[in-house]
Structures are given as structure tokens and as C-alpha cells.
Amino acid sequence: MTQRVFITGGASGLGRAIALRYAREGAKVCIGDISPEQGIEVEAEINKAGGEGHFLECDVRRLSDFEKVRDDLVQKWGGVDIVVNNAGVASAGSIEDTTIADWEWILDINVMGVVRGCKAFTPLFKQQGAGAFVNIASMAGLMLAPLMGSYNVSKAGVIALSETLSQELRDSGIHVSCVCPAFFQTNLTSSMRSDIPGVQQNVNKLMKRSNLTADDVAEDIFRSVNDNAFWVLPHAKERRMWILKRHAPWAFDWLMHQESKRWMGKMGGKANA
């Protein structure tokens, strides 16, 4: 059966990579985005890759946009099998310097955007008796580096929501995957908010050093949905650190503090000795 996929933030970065991965399987892929020009370009790429592409404008800050997409896809394709809540933004800054407006901005997109996606499509999935949510979180929601408070909280919120819904919806035939990548090359810093000088450049350097690409992460996501796996943790080093945190938290705390001092030095902050 041909899969029907909807991806928020699908016009660039990881969203685009996921769209093209499913397209290569012949899937019907709808990308929702706030960038029509890029969206139409990726729609054409999906068609060229062997899928059936479709672009719809979707701002994850509006539940009505999700509901319109859902209704359009039911009319066009008869339903949806996979919803990838991918759209997100980044921010960096200390607790005293990050404005409340920036906190509200990132939580509205990164957390409430995922909430809206799950809320809009859950009734359809229940009606179908099947469906899958793929929620893009981050290792930032598990590792919690300093000077990233608002971003960390937003991604920890996605993890908490995903774990909750995995239990809540399982008996309705609905699968949930929670994706927690570390740094990889993407366009996340293009909309990043921060008062820290040079933070975008420093984050971009870390992204470029990664040995994983957006295509690699997309492959892990594709496999996880097929295998009904909850956790998607693409980066081996950070995966080991997360295991250490769970089994030897005191050792993780010491290592994290050492790493945090280096991180804050790069970011222009100050760490306590």
C-alpha cells in the first residue's frame, strides 16, 4: 500500500530529507511550510524522486492550518498514514538575558506546534485504526547544555509529549516515534534568536563537523517507523552519554560539567568552577 505522509517544515533541512526518503519509496508526500517558493521546489523534487508531491502552506502556530491540511489530504488521498512534526526553531542565551518574548516564541513553535499537529490528526488516525506520529525533538532535550535553556525546555517538552502519547494512543493502533539527533548539517541557525555574539557561527561549525547528514537522520527515521521503534537516536557518542546519564548519573554530571565549561567558553559565557 502506498504510504501517505505529511511533514511540517518540509521545504528545507531535515524535513526535505525525510520527504525525499519517502518519495524514493513511491510515497505520497505533502510538505507543509511557510515558504511557498521552497515548498513548490521540493514538491517537484518529490515527483522527480518517484513519489507524488504536494505542497500546502502550514504555519504550525495555527491549529486551523493543520485542520485545513488534514481535511485537504482526506479529500485528496483518503487519509494520512504518517505525520512528521518537524518544524522548529532555535535560540540560545542565559536565563537572565533571554527575553520572555523569545521563550514564548520558541515554545509556541517547538512545543505547541507539535501539540497542534498531534491534536489535529489523532481523530483521523483513530478513525482509520492506524497512523504514526514522528516528533522531532533533539538531544538537547536529554543532555541539557547551558545557555540553551529555552531550546532545551522546548525539546524536552516534545519528548515528554511523545512518551505520553506513545502510551495513550498505542491501543488505538497509533505509533509514536521520538527523534533526538545531535548536531548535523541543517539550516536551523537561519532563524536562530540569540544575544550571544557569534553563536550562529559556532553552532554552524559544530554542525559541519558532524559525520551524519540530514539524509542519514532521515534514513533512521524511515527505519524506526517501519520497525515501530519509539526512540530514534542517530548519534552514537550522544547515545552513549544518554545511557550513562540513565545508569550512572553522578558520572554523567561530572562529564557534563567539564563539557559545559568548554561549551560556555565557545559561546562566550562563563562557567562556575
Image (cartoon, rainbow, N blue to C red):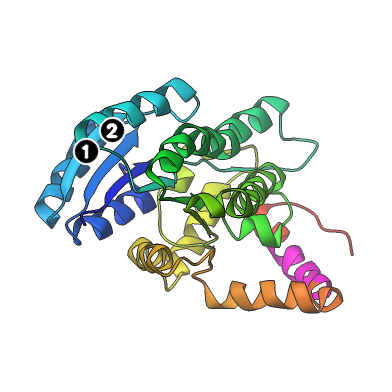
Q: Is residue 146 magenta?
A: no
Magenta segment, principal secondary structure?
helix
Q: Nearer the viewer, residue 49 or 261?
A: 49
Q: Is residue 211 above or below residue 50?
A: below
Q: Position of residue 209 (x, y in %)?
A: 46, 69
* Pointers 2 and 1 in contact (C-beta within 8 Å): yes
Give the residue type that dot 2 points to: Val
Q: Which residue is mark 1?
A: 77
Disc 2/disc 1 C-alpha distance (Å): 5 Å
Q: Is residue 180 above or below residue 85?
A: below
The answer to whether one can see residue 108 in this image is: yes
Q: Which residue is mark 2?
A: 74
Q: Is residue 130 above or below residue 60?
A: below
Secondary element under disc 2, as helix, strand or loop, is helix
Residue in the image at 76% along x and 69% along y: 256
Q: Position of residue 215 (x, y in %)?
A: 33, 64
Q: Is residue 247 above or below residue 92?
A: below
Instruction: Identify the image quadrant of residue 261.
Output: bottom right
Q: Which residues are magenta?
A: 253-263
Q: Nearer the viewer, residue 115 or 271?
A: 115
Q: Position of residue 232 (x, y in %)?
A: 51, 66
Residue in the image at 89% along x and 65% along y: 273
Q: Position of residue 70 (x, y in %)?
A: 35, 31
